[in-house]
């Protein structure tokens, strides 16, 4: 059963001759246990698709359904509760709280959501991402790559049913990028979640079950691309 569906979804900005169709009519389904890549050039609509799928933006038309619940007509307060419970975001605009240490970022989630990773699981996650020594540091003390890895840890820590990642490896070197994709693949399969990764880096699609290409707001399922480096 699909745990994420977009039915006849569109997103436009502006009106008249200034109207821009950022996302043309889109039909999309993602099943549990699937790791999906969305590739395409900058400005093609990938990030718009991702933020609509996660309830951060509302579509101009159509419905977004998460685990059987149509979130499109919900109030922002109710959508926020769905996001907190169901979705782990890895966004380019870091969603770290600037005045909290890495460790306290996780503790804040514990105060707002149940069912997060155990302490042992969190320690393993820190180890897998190579950020254990960063737990007492603030976001401003971290490099771009370190911040990116903490964002990944924060998203996975909450045990979401859906992970939405916007260029999650953009600030990482190749070896670390492959490690992160391997981790996302493992989490997706072992916890039966759905992960959608928006990326420019086609080297990463070898980890994915499906690959979609976004061109000028149109999303099309591609034949699976194979990259030996991604295995």
Image (spheres, rainbow, N blue to C red):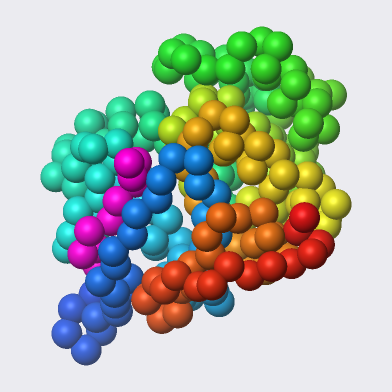
Residue nearer the viewer, 82 or 212: 212
- Left or right, 103 with respect to 10, comes to right
The residue lying at 47 percent from left, 15 percent from top is: 115
Residue nearer the viewer, 23 or 205: 205
Above or below, 197 relative to 118? below
The residue lying at 30 percent from left, 51 percent from top is: 5
Above or below, 36 relative to 23? above
* Residue 7 covered by magenta stretch: yes
* Image quadrant in which the N terminus is located: top left
Residue nearer the viewer, 172 or 142: 172
Residue 60: in sight, yes or no?
no
- Left or right, 189 with respect to 164, comes to right
* Image quadrant in which the C terminus is located: bottom right
* Residue 154 covered by magenta stretch: no
The picture places residue 67, in percent across and down from the top left corner, at 30, 36
> What residue range appears in magenta?
1-13
- Left or right, 68 with respect to 90, comes to left
Is the stretch drawn in magenta largely helix, strand or loop?
strand
């Amino acid at each position: 059963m699909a745990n994420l569906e977009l039915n006849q979804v569109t997103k436009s900005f502006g009106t008249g001759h200034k109207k821009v169709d950022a996302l043309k009519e889109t039909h999309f389904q993602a099943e549990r246990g699937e790791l999906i890549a969305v590739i395409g050039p900058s400005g093609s609509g990938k990030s718009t698709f991702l933020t609509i799928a996660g309830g951060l933006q509302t579509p101009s038309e159509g419905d977004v359904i998460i685990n059987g619940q149509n979130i499109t007509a919900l109030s922002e307060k109710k959508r926020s509760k769905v996001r907190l419970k169901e979705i782990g975001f890895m966004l380019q605009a870091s969603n770290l709280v600037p005045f909290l240490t890495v460790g306290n970022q996780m503790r804040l989630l514990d105060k707002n959501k149940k069912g997060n990773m155990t302490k042992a699981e969190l320690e393993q996650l820190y180890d897998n991402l190579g950020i254990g020594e960063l737990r007492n540091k603030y976001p401003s003390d971290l490099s771009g790559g370190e911040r990116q890895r903490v964002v990944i840890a924060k998203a996975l820590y909450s045990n979401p049913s859906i992970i939405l990642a916007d260029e999650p490896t953009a600030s990482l070197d190749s070896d670390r990028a492959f490690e992160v994709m391997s981790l996302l693949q493992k989490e997706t399969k072992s916890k039966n979640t759905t992960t959608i990764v928006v990326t420019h880096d086609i080297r990463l699609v070898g980890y994915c079950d499906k690959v979609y290409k976004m061109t000028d707001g149109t999303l099309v399922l591609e034949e699976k691309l194979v990259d030996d480096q991604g295995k």
